[in-house]
Amino acid sequence: MDSHGDMGLLGEHFDPSIMERIKEDGYESRSGSDHLEGASGDDQETGENKRPRKKKYHRHTPHQIQELEFCFKECPHPDEKQRMELSRRLGLENKQIKFWFQNRRTQMKTQLERHENIILRQENDKLRAENELLKQNMTDPICNNCGGLAVLGPVSYEQQQLRIENSRLKDEIGRVCALANKFLGRPLSSSASPTPPFGSNSMLDLSVGINGYEALANIETTLPIGLDYNDGITMPFIKQMTSPVVNEIPYDRSMFIELALAAMDELVKIAQTDSPLWIKSLEGGKDALNYEGYTRTFSPCIGVKPSSFVAEATRETGTVIISSLALIETLMDVNRWTEAFPDLIARACTIDVISSGMAGTKNGALQVMHAEFQVVSPFVPVRQVRFIRFCKQLAEGVWAMVDVSIDANQESSFSLPSAACRRLPSGCIIQDMPNGCSKITWVEHSEYDESAVHHLYRSVLSSGVGFGAQRWIATLQRYCECMAILASPTISGDDQTVVNISGKKSMVKLAQRMVENFCSGVCASSARKWDKLTVENVGEDVRILTRKNINDPGEPPGVVLSATTSVWLPITRQRLFDFLRDERLRSEWDILSHGGMMQEMVHISKGHSRGNCVSLLRASAVSANANENNMLILQETWNDASSSLIVYAPVDVPSMSVVMNGGDSTYVALLPSGFVIHQGGPSFSNGTLVERDNDGGDGGGSLLTVGFQILVNNLPTAKLTVESVETVNNLISCTIQRINTVLQLT
């Protein structure tokens, strides 16, 4: 029996207690490692006249068991050639290999049969319980109107109170519907029974009394009450209309529904290809928003722009290797959304789910979210935005997702202290294509305080390279390419070391965590708790952060120091990226390489471009220092239309051996360093430093962000010294100087 096929029998009804029962029977402990020589499986032969031979047991070594188990996962039925190879490699006889696989298959079959029996027993118990419940309901029928017994008889005091409470709740539902009608200006679609109009007298006004909406506070209702959208789509209320609290400030969900409808209407109109609201810019030919026409067409849905803020609006169209339905599921799941945009989203969470959608889809889903958006540079503050996200299916195979800030919603009782950024209706229109891909039109529209941004990066943000639609599309394309490659049966790569598919996926996961940690140390987001330091001998353009690690297994324990800065270089982004990612030239700028040459051991492709990859490097020459020979370099690089990245971290050989064999990478300690490159920034004209835009191609030079994380003391309680800060500051200065010297930029 095929092991992979049998495992599918476990299904969604798998009970964790099954594993405990199996362990009691000793199946997990043996794992097919005890081998009975002389007879096993289907090859046992006995004769009537032969005296039984004394059984001789042979226990395999842990290494042999590990190798056999690994081969069993890949191929439960090895052929003669594979058995001979295992026999030669493990020092076992061909017969022993054959018997071990027979025993392991028999053991797996027995385990699966036990699993099936336990699951069937559980299903049988559930059916028996449901049968008993149906019998009880048939003997004691319940009235659907009042909730009491259908058979006439004496009614207890408790039952009378429950009937009164039930009637009061119906009256409350009518008042909630009337309130929603008042805010939305349109009728509610409801299949519930008619209720008294708002303000009418009822018997409950005298017998029970109306105290607002407290009765709904502790009830999760699934009544068929909804709010009609513009095209008749109905949003069910999953929770009560009022009384949720965010940051100790209550808000009214009905206000968010009206805001979501207005934002969706604006997004659909502004994303149209032939929309007159967009004009071609003179520099670069990109779409630029016609603000005069925009203000005439739309009224501000989140209030008037503050006088100190500047506006940023971009639109981009692209094709991604993913269906519209799968992409919507990714965007509406906060964890998958964050994973898809690792360098754009520092941290995100869902505060409240007002609607989860209808008919098992995300059509009509509405949720309140908080996110921190970042450009990987210490010169650009992290944007903290609280917004609502609304998803709607426009047609068959056509979806829309819109975000809009709730910070400055003037009509709502919910507001936050003034933030440095406001997200106007932004999002995407997704349309399925015949080849399994999707066409996406992405719109980004925001207002922010430009004074908080360093002058080097103001042109990067104003052109949309920082937070604009171009960057969202480019990042999403890179993510979808990577997912398509990882989902394929084979992962391409040029390896000098044999790594199986599970090992490569484990390395990609480890590299993803490395990049996230690097971005956190550069941007000082709340994803990790960093404390900012001010040191006299360190320039104001260098940001120094520190944190104490005690329980995080993902980095070494002790005091960690992060130092980062950004500089402008008169060189194209592509040339700088090619130079920094070339392992043969690494000794030219990497002070910690001690001048040694680096060699690429493993290359895992994450996209069509060779520059988008995860690689493992090692020193090509043997060092006299044993610690250096025991260290490798894990590196991830990417290069898309918006930015380039090179992030690396030293890792020890034993840890990487576990990861390359498909083991858990959670406990591999990393302290990443690296570079991020953006095109643009200032440029020189006639010896004078002037500002340049980013639309002009490669002529504007590059903005290089350099970041290092080092362990200054392995005791979390140790105090940080000035010498440690000066050391990492000198490391940054020397690295930048070497790059300038080698590329002849100074």
Image: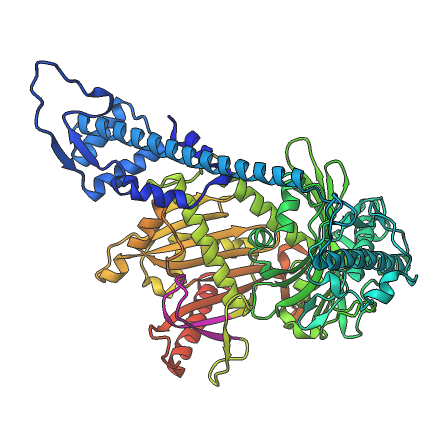
Q: Nearer the viewer, residue 298 or 211?
A: 211
Span highlighted in magenta in the image: 542-564
Rendered image quadrant of residue 363: top right
Decide if residue 197 is on the left or right side of residue 344.
right
Q: Quadrant of residue 303?
A: bottom right
Q: How is the image coloured?
A: rainbow
| Visible residue check, residue 612 | yes
Q: Majority secondary structure of the magenta segment?
A: strand
Q: Quadrant of the N terminus?
A: top left
The residue drawn where x is 91% and y is 57% is 197
Asked if one can make out residue 446 in the rendered structure from this viewpoint, the answer is no
Q: In the visual, does 664 lie left or right of 237?
A: left
Residue visible at 77% across and 57% down in the picture:
425
Figure label count: 0
Where residue 195 appears, as percent x and y from the top left, is 87, 53
Is 293 situated left or right of 403 in this image? right
62 relative to 278, above or below: above
Query: Which image quadrant is residue 346 in?
Result: bottom right
- Which x, y percent locates residue 67? 26, 38
Q: Nearer the viewer, residue 61 or 405?
A: 61
> Which of 24/387 is in front?
24
The x and y percentages for residue 457 are 64, 67
Q: Residue furthest bottom?
A: 536
Q: Is residue 462 above or below residue 274?
A: below
* Residue 626: x %, y % from top left: 22, 60
Q: Is residue 48 magenta?
A: no
